[in-house]
Image (cartoon, rainbow, N blue to C red):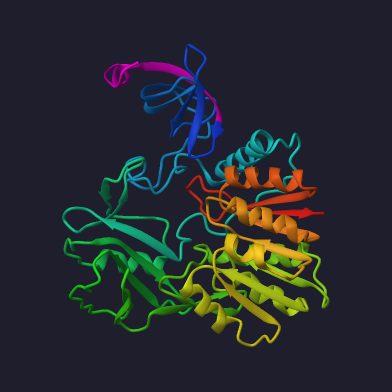
Amino acid sequence: MGQHDLRHAVYEIDLLSPAYGGTCLGRLPDGRAVFVPLGLPGERVRVRLVEARRTFARAELLEVLRPSAQRISPRCPHFGECGGCHYQHMDYATQCALKEAILREQLQRLAGIPEPPLRPLVPSPNAWNYRNTVQFHLDGQGRLGYHRPDSHEVVAIRECHLPEPVLNQVWPQLDLEPIPGLERVELRVGSGEEVLLILESRDPQAPEFSVDFPLSAVHLSPAGTIVLAGEDYLVMEVLGRPFKVSAPSFFQVNTAQAAAMVQNLLEHLPLTPQTTLLDVYCGVGLFTAFLAPRVGRCLGVEVSPSACEDFAVNLDEFDHVALYQGAAEEVLPWLDVRPEVVVVDPPRAGMAPAALEALIRLEPTCIAYVSCDPATLARDLRRLMEAGYTLRHVTPFDLFPQTYHIESISLLVR
């Protein structure tokens, strides 16, 4: 079928089940799976195909002919047009149930686990205004916005219900010209409601900058960090413990849920004063800081130079903590340490194959795998189980309400 025909291929279908990525699965008359965004299981809908492959298709939702009882009106006028949210058309309890079902299905299908040992999902204390960090793109007029779904086109926004309230007071006041080379505008809020503005640019030259309300600002480019106002870092607080987080460093965007994940690790990891613990993709030391007091020796592995500098500050009080700077796939094969317990928190792409194989050769007794993507989690769990590990349990955490993203912690033992 050519692209021209595709645009006219309109079908009425029933939506059957939720799929990862914010879509619902239905079937075309020829039996092919079709993935439809903004739908709900059980709905009858009219859709137009936007992509057709031999085994599956993708469609846009034209009309809901028979709505689900779960369908509600979205809170935000930009919903469906801006790609920031995927689930505002259902209430929060339904979102959580859907995420549990999707994680179970991914583990069954991709990891080959008939009955995944899934624990109940830990919901976010706030379903709205939970993000301590927000990233904008600029449209042609310099207005802040988000990418349209599956596109690089920027939709300028007037409101957003995901950032913490302080950030929602700040971003509408930003007046930015269309600056050549400026790729992203990020805002972060720290524990004392300090705000850090980060301008990410391809151009090493910092723009003219002035602001008439108190915030820190930095310009990030391949040439490095230039401080435009205030400091180049924030202090974030989790469970009463402060963490220095520099502008280029990663930190969990949902502070309350970061605390819940720390507590999950403290509860389930077998830690003793004799334990050697390895924390891979350790970032600024969020997990290490809470696990280190319980073990005899602690090693971190992190590739980001700024996160490594923050880690050194955040873990300075401990004499038994060491840090290896480098990619996991480069560091792990050369480690001459035998850790009993390993925590891994890889990016969305999961662990690089070389890092995963090196982890298996280290033969830890227990592995906690922190994941933000069920598909790559399932792939890596399958390999760990082939290597002799047993999956004890998987706890999903909702760090990103209103979106399809699913965070989880899996515990494996040898």
Find residue 217 and report its image quarter.
Answer: bottom left
Looking at the image, which residue is at 54% across and 29% down?
41
Q: Is residue 142 found left or right of 70 in the rendered image?
A: left
Looking at the image, which residue is at 53% across and 56% down?
347
Q: Is residue 336 above or below residue 86?
A: below
The number of numbered badges drawn on the structure is: 0
Looking at the image, which residue is at 35% across and 17% down?
10
Instruction: Work out whether residue 261 or residue 184 is closer to the camera in this orientation and state it.
Output: 184
Q: Is residue 5 magenta?
A: yes
Instruction: Using the rendered image of the protein, determine whether residue 91 is visible from the camera's viewpoint.
Output: yes
Bounds of the magenta span? 1-17
Q: Is residue 414 magenta?
A: no
Q: Is residue 57 above or below residue 23?
A: above
Find residue 208 and report its image quarter.
Answer: bottom left
Residue 269 in picture, x, y percent from top left: 77, 64
Instruction: Work out whether residue 28 or residue 377 is closer to the camera in this orientation and state it.
Output: 377
Residue 119 in picture, x, y percent from top left: 73, 48
Residue 175 in picture, x, y percent from top left: 20, 67
Find residue 190 and report its image quarter.
Answer: bottom left
Instruction: Work out whether residue 60 or residue 153 is closer to the camera in this orientation and state it.
Output: 153
Residue 130 in picture, x, y percent from top left: 48, 61
Which image quadrant: the C terminus? bottom right
Which image quadrant: the N terminus? top left
